[in-house]
Image (cartoon, rainbow, N blue to C red):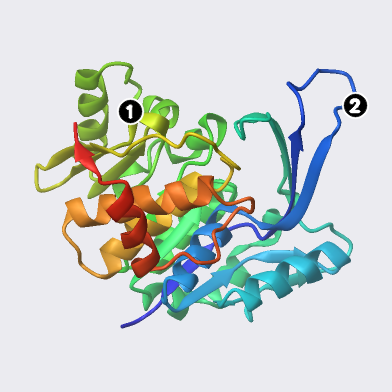
Amino acid sequence: MGYVAGVGALNADFIGKSRADPVLRDSNPGYVRINAGGVTRNILENLARMGLDCRLLTAVGRDALGDMALDATREAGVDVSRALRVSGEPTSTYCALLEPSGEMFAALSDMRILERLDDAYLDAHAALLSGADVVALDTSLPERAIDRVLELARGAPVFADPVSTAYAKKLLGRVGRFSMLKPNRMELEVLSRMRADTEAALRASAEKLVAEGCRAVYVTLGADGCAFADARGRYLRMKMRPVEHMQNATGAGDAFAAGALYGFVKRYAPERTLALALAAGRAAILSPGTVEPRVGESFLDSILAENPVASC
């Protein structure tokens, strides 16, 4: 088996959870955790904990937060030896305020350092990208960096997480260049330029991305599970019993993406892949941290045994 290459932010995440419903323009008592983050980084940590060889290309400041994020990611099993250390610029940061339920109330990100991932840096790692089993990226990258990664990956399949409705716009005009995309419902509407607010519209929107050239589309739908469409004409809708007591919603989408990529690398059938992805997302939601440290195929199977996936 080969390896998974990732290109994206390596953040210091500040995750605050309010004890009561948050009040705007006021100080809210609660709890704050600081940990390594970044969408692609989180995906790779999940995959590394699942036993895959994962290698990250990123830019990190020469500061204490950068040291913390690098050390934590390295200890989780991700190869960060190629990270670009940058003097005079802060490590990228992500701040999220969660409601007592664990749902996000507001968030702010500072990804300016990713502008340093220029062609010279990416070109120096062209062989890493083209030789990967799959390349994962997210739209916190500048558009020119996204284009360069797509060019350098050559025959390697490329996966993208749109991250947000604002960042998803970076993928417009590029959908057909990706092998796999993982939008949520709102991001799907941006990419397809269609509503996805009914089951029929959801399917039509996902299949439109496939018609534009994307080989597989995984749509996360929160408590409504997920949808899947691919170039072989398959369409699936699956879900599992909703979580009753959420801990932290911030890493669920990243964990789902990791489950989908794990199934892709292992060449599992879509049904098995989606089941693992849903279980990984559930594990993240129930974990106080962004990544559930026990994540792995046997652990996910134990979740599925207690919470079977159903077609819908």
Q: Nearer the viewer, mark 1 or mark 2?
A: 2
Whether 138 is drawn above or below 186: the answer is below
Decide if residue 157 is in sight here.
Answer: no
Question: Where residue 27 is drawn, which disc sits there?
Answer: 2
**Which three-letter amino acid code belongs to the residue tagged 2?**
Ser
Amino acid under disc 1:
Ser
Q: Which mark is drawn over residue 144?
A: none
Q: Residues within 10 Å of mark 2 (few under 14, many from 20)?
A: few
Residue 240 seen by the camera: yes
Q: Residue at x 80, y 18 (%)?
A: 23
Instruction: Give the answer, above or below, for where 180 lies relative to 45.
Output: above
What residue is drawn where x is 76% and y is 72%? 85
Query: Residue 192: which disc?
Result: 1
Q: Position of residue 109 (x, y in %)?
A: 71, 41
**Lower sequence index among marks 1 and 2:** 2
Q: Give x and y (percent) for residue 147.
A: 47, 54
Q: Quadrant of the N terminus?
A: bottom left
Work out which residue is located at the far left of the displayed protein and give it.
233
Q: Quadrant of residue 57?
A: bottom right
- 4 sits to left or right of 292: left
Instruction: Say which element carries label 1.
Output: helix
